[in-house]
Structures are given as C-alpha cells and as structure tokens.
Image (spheres, rainbow, N blue to C red):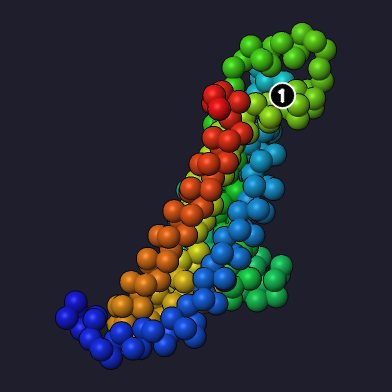
Amino acid sequence: MLDKMFTPESLEEAWVILKEEMLFALWETTYVTVLATAFAILLGLPLGILLVAGEKDGVLPLPKGVMHVLNVVINLLRSVPFLILMILVFPLTRLIVGTSVGTTASIVPLVIAAFPFVARLVESSLRELNPNIIEMAQSMGASPMQIIVKVMLPESIPSLISNFTIAITTILGYTAMSGIIGGGGLGKIAINYGYYRYKYLVMLIAVIILIVLVQVFQSVGTKLAVKLDRRVKR
C-alpha cells in the first residue's frame, strides 16, 4: 500500500483533489462543527445547570422524579453509538431540514449526540465550584437565578471553556463519521476516496487536516480559558 501511495500518479491525483475539493470540504467541516457545537451548548448548558441547581441541596431544587427522568434521558442519549444514532434520527432530520443526507442534515444528529455530553461537562464544571461562594451569595439574599447567572456561571467560565473545547473536538471527530451517511466535509473525502476508491494518500491528507483542526480548536480554547481564569497570575 505504501509503495503505491507516493507514486507520481498518486501525488498528481491527490493534488488535483486537494485543489478542487479539499478546501470546500474544510469549510464544510468547520461550518458543521461550529454550528453543531453552538446548538449543543445552547441545549446542554441549561440542562447541565439543572443537574446541579436542581438537586435536593441545590439553589433551585426540583422534584426528585424530574431529576431522575432528566438523568435517565441524558444517559440514554449518551449511550447510543453515534453511527446508530444518525440512522435513528433520520425522520427527525428529514422533518427539520427537509432531507436526511447532506452537510446541513448532519448537524441534527451531531447536536442530538453532543448536547447530553455537553450537559455532563457543564455539570462537572459547576461541581468544581467552592460551595462557600454559593453560601455567601445565599446569605446576602440573592435569588436562585441571580446565584446561577451572577455567581455559578461567571466563576465557572474557565472550566466551562475548557470543557466546551473538549466538546468541539469531539464533535469534529463525529463529523468525520457522518460522511458514511452522506454528510459532507473531510469525512466524506476520506471515505469516498480512501475507503471506496483505495486512494489512501487523499485519505491521509484529510486525516492530517482533521488533526490540525483539532490542534487549532484546542489551542484557542486553552488560551482563552487561561486568559479568563482569575486564579492565574499575570
């Protein structure tokens, strides 16, 4: 395989594909990843807050049954493998987008797979808070919503950003798998050329670009988390 990967014909063919398709595939992957992450955070953030604030000793206690159902639903969605989930949500994807295949259509299963994960990450960040800070806010007469918005979330921003960075890199990996069901982007390039046509050099280039994207997202997220961390001495 290696001896055929770097032949002049393979190199020329890979260069043509790189010029004609790879840049657009890179845009599709970035577009889907960022948009799916935004929607996943939009859904997962309030759920993660409820998982902590809604506990018996939380700032906004919810009925035990509600908390149990919430945890069960999140755990169930997290336990379904992404490839199976993509197929299961075909009807919902078709209802929302109008089609079950394509770049935009892949956002729906990505969000459904990611928002329970984001909820658990938010829960983890909020549980790292010093309980004395919350108790102090309560003693000053702050309402539950004020505690959540003005104390819990601001104090957890560095940890939240770090966890959101984990989420976006995970979703980026999911986008590659979505190429199996017709999703666009680098995953489609890797599968169509590397798996179906045995053009392994093209697949290798797509994988390298995905790795670079992960490093970019991770570096930006890490620097932003450090910059916003009040505990870091500048």
Query: Where does residue 164 sit, x and y in percent of width and height?
Result: 56, 44
Residue 153, x across and y down, in percent: 68, 31
Q: Residue at x 67, y 54 (%)?
A: 39
Say if 222 sits above or below 34 in the image.
Answer: above
Work out whether 47 lies above or below 57: below
Q: Is residue 54 visible?
A: no
The correct choice, above or below, for 20 with respect to 214 in the image is below
Q: Secondary structure at mark 1?
A: helix
Question: Furthest-bottom residue in view?
Answer: 9
In the displayed image of the protein, which residue is found farthest to the top?
A: 139
The three-letter code of the residue at mark 1 reads Val
Residue at 54% x, 35% y: name it: 226
Residue 197 rendering spot, x and y as whole percentages: 34, 85
Instruction: Write down the residue under mark 1.
Output: 151
Question: In this rendering, would 150 be left or right of 115?
Answer: right
**Image quadrant assignment for residue 210:** bottom left
Residue at the extreme front of the image, as rendered: 234
Residue 35 falls left or right of residue 137: left
